[in-house]
Image (spheres, rainbow, N blue to C red):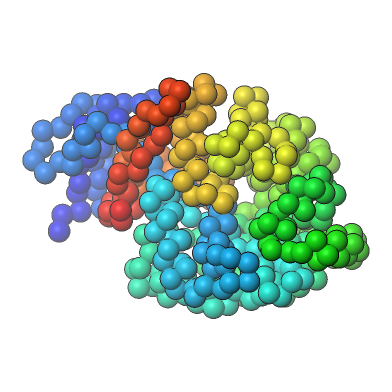
């Protein structure tokens, strides 16, 4: 089988322009980008659709959702992984950082139990070529939880561990400055009773005082020693960002205020916001809207967060709302997250980079908006969807 492919009759979304042209793939990498339509026999006709670089998702809770589709309902690891993998590929995601949380007092929760069997399943599926996307690990560390370091142990030394984020979901600060938003989330998403919620809130401050700082120091030292990318989560104040920068963080995930995002830009941290925030028109937690940060020039990366399809939809919404040009919006879901996580070999339609490609048709919907429909996905030149 030839390792050369030619894609033609496409709108190629390049880093700084959209080009009506053709793209040649050789040995799983982009060999050439050229204007115009090719008449070479065997060329793949994309019928005028857009050809994008494969999306790079550095923070998704989607795998966890498949592992526990309902509160306290555990799903088997293999079908959960394959369903998650198929869903992210169908959303145009060719590189995914599976965000797995460690640390929670509730042992019935995913984040309060061990991830050993999940990691074994991921390794086995990858070894057998069963996965459509390229999977990496993003471990989300809940700093005030007593068991965070113990539950992190299976990830230590794992070759797919590429990103660690530091979280503190103590109600009354960061994401949960508004206690009522925390109540809605934990009662609805986690299935907690009001009594359990009140008990957890009462314990939270004590746990934070006892564990948050020593755990933070541990993970900062671990990332420095092993060269793992570090992100801070839900920064609210400028001091939160200053601390993250001093500790070596390269990203500020989901800052909750304009002040925090502004300081992140000043200090050179990339700002990550959720695609659902863009699509819905605001944060479900009542924090700053991603569109507002985009309007201020403070948005660097879009993550799907909890809806894989929101990456492309969110990027297109930024374009439709006049907040970014198409190449800039696509960079927030491809090249910028790739560079932020140390994957310089992908994320753009440029010669020499991996041929991770997504064929997208833009369909006009109500009120002059457009919806991106994924029609084909290739990873290193191999069609996976």
Q: Is residue 69 above or below residue 338?
A: below
Find residue 379 and report its horizontal and vertical position in percent: 34, 53
Q: Furthest-front residue in view?
A: 194
Q: Is residue 60 above or below residue 267?
A: below
- Give whichever of 251, 272 is nearer the camera: 272
Residue lying at 48% horizontally and 26% vertically, measured from the top left? 319
Q: Say left or right for 183 vs 198.
A: left
Q: Say left or right for 312 vs 342.
A: left
Q: Is residue 331 above or below residue 136?
A: above
Residue lying at 72% horizontally and 67% vertically, measured from the top left? 103
Find residue 306 and report its horizontal and vertical position in percent: 56, 51
Residue lying at 55% horizontally and 65% vertically, measured from the top left? 69
Find residue 52 and report its horizontal and vertical position in percent: 36, 38
- Give whichever of 249, 259 is nearer the camera: 259
Q: Say left or right for 20 vs 273.
A: left
Q: Furthest-left residue in view?
A: 41
Q: Say left or right for 180 vs 152.
A: right
Find residue 377 and report its horizontal and vertical position in percent: 32, 49
């Amino acid at each position: 089988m030839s390792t050369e492919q030619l894609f033609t009759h496409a709108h190629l979304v390049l880093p700084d322009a959209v080009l009506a042209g053709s793209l040649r793939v050789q040995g799983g990498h982009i060999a050439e980008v050229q204007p115009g339509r090719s008449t070479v026999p065997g060329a793949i006709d994309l019928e005028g659709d857009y050809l994008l670089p494969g999306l790079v998702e550095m923070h998704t809770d989607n795998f966890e959702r498949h592992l526990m589709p309902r509160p306290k309902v555990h799903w088997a690891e293999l079908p959960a992984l394959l369903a998650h993998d198929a869903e992210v590929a169908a959303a145009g995601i060719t590189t995914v950082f599976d965000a797995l949380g460690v640390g929670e007092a509730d042992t019935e929760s995913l984040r309060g139990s061990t991830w050993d069997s999940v990691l074994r399943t991921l390794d086995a599926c990858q070894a057998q070529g069963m996965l459509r996307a390229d999977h990496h690990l993003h471990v989300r560390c809940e700093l005030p939880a007593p068991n965070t370091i113990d539950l992190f142990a299976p990830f230590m030394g794992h070759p797919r561990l590429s990103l660690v984020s530091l979280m503190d979901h103590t109600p009354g600060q960061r994401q949960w400055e508004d206690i009522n938003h925390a109540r809605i989330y934990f009662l609805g998403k986690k299935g907690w009773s009001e009594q359990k919620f009140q008990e957890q809130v009462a314990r939270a401050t004590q746990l934070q005082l006892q564990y948050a700082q020593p755990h933070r120091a541990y993970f900062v030292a671990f990332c420095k020693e092993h060269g793992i990318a570090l992100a801070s989560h839900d920064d609210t104040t400028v001091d939160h960002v200053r601390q993250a920068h001093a500790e070596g963080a390269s990203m500020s995930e989901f800052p909750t205020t304009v002040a925090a995002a502004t300081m992140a830009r000043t200090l050179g941290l990339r700002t990550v916001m959720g695609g659902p925030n863009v699509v819905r028109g605001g944060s479900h937690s009542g924090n700053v809207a991603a569109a507002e940060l985009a309007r201020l020039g403070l948005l660097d990366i879009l993550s799907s967060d909890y809806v894989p399809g929101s990456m492309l939809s969110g990027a297109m919404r930024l374009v439709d709302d006049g907040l970014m040009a198409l190449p800039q919006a696509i960079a927030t879901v491809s090249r910028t997250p790739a560079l932020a996580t140390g994957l310089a070999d992908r994320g753009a339609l440029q010669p020499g980079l991996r041929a991770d490609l997504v064929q997208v048709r833009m369909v006009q919907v109500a009120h002059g908006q457009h919806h991106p429909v994924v029609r084909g996905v290739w990873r290193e030149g191999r069609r996976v969807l």
